[in-house]
Amino acid sequence: MSELKTGFVWHELYMWHNTDGHTLFLPSGMSLEPYRHVENPDAKRRVKNLLDASGLSSQLELLVPRKASTVDLARAHTEQHVVDVKLKNEQGRRDAGALAPLGEGSYEIARLSAGGLLSALDAIHSGDIQNAYALVRPPGHHAEAALSMGFCIFNNGAVAARYAQSVLGYSKIAIIDWDVHHGNGTQAIFWDDPSVLTVSLHQDRCFPPDSGHTHENGEGPGLGYNLNVPLPSGSGRGAYLAALEQVAIPALERFQPDLIFVACGYDAGAFDPMARQMLSSEAFGQMTALIKDAAARLCGGRLLMYHEGGYHAETVPYFALRVIEELAGIQTGVEDPFLMAAEALGGQGLQPHQSEMIDQAAMNLEAIGS
């Protein structure tokens, strides 16, 4: 196995994307008192702080992100959408689309967020690193080709996939998304494209509320190359590992990708305010180990993980630390003070109703490559 370091993408400006100060006006005319937006910098800044405090940061290859160009963005988005976001930001508008907050300079920071993945891909392609973790913000997996949505301005993963194909010459990209919310934007962008496999593990009917069903499998040439595993609320380690072992990993084996991406959200973690799942730091570590092993077998270890959701500022840093430890093959010895509480939650093992949903999703595997 290569002794190459794991790459790590970070920039202070990611923390300067300002989502606060919104007042919601309802049809009745009533408004919601402004409050701290749930997609604020705290969780991600604390990830970086814990990586530094643990000593892990110094053992990673720090990668300096660049801004994605308009050409880069337009491979995954319509040119008009890119122009519209820029104009809205210049005009001081506070929302780029459907629940996608804008603050001063957010357009440029969103370009830097997408560009962070491109910098990581360049380093993987050159052989400087074998895998990478991009701690970027704003997130991206809800953004569609012509729509910013759900805290996401541009679809970072989709922009990176198109860059990998168009510029770096990779043919087949697989995107595994375990953010607790359905990766609807990524699904929509690659809906009819058999060169990009998308697999989303998410809480059933969480967000978007009527999206991510097992019967959503793509269409035309892309039929079969989009898989969804909608897991019931209350799913823990057993359900997520089973979903990976019975759906995501077999899908990768059938697809034989040149690169594997992971849209790495932590909002399926126990105690997250935006969902009702029960993952612990150890569960996230085991999930990462499964994907890392698949990457080693299928595509020379080429693996890019990038940060999506995760809104419980106290626990998310320990989830991310465990993931990056597994990715880098380094154990810091830092103990997760929340691990016992998460693992003690009842129902961590695979439950019959969860197994039923996973079995339904697995029925779609045969369409890949057929």
Image (cartoon, rainbow, N blue to C red):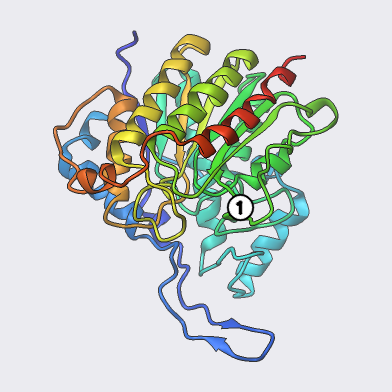
Figure quadrant of residue 31 = bottom right
Front-most of 302 and 73? 302
Whole-percent x, y for residue 71 in the image: 69, 42
Work out which residue is located at the far front of the displayed protein and give it: 352
Quadrant of image for the C terminus: top right
Whole-percent x, y for residue 45 in the image: 31, 54
Whole-percent x, y for residue 144 in the image: 69, 49
User: Circle 1 sits on which residue?
Assistant: 205
Q: Is residue 294 left or right of residue 167?
A: left
Residue 370 in sight: yes
Does residue 4 lie above or below 144 as drawn? above
Query: Are there few (<14), some (14-19), or many (20+) residues within 10 Å of tag 1?
Result: some
Could you tell me which secondary element the residue under label 1 belongs to? loop
Does residue 333 lie above or below 210 as drawn? above
Front-most of 27 and 159? 27
Whole-percent x, y for residue 160 in the image: 58, 35
Q: Is residue 41 left or right of residue 175?
A: left
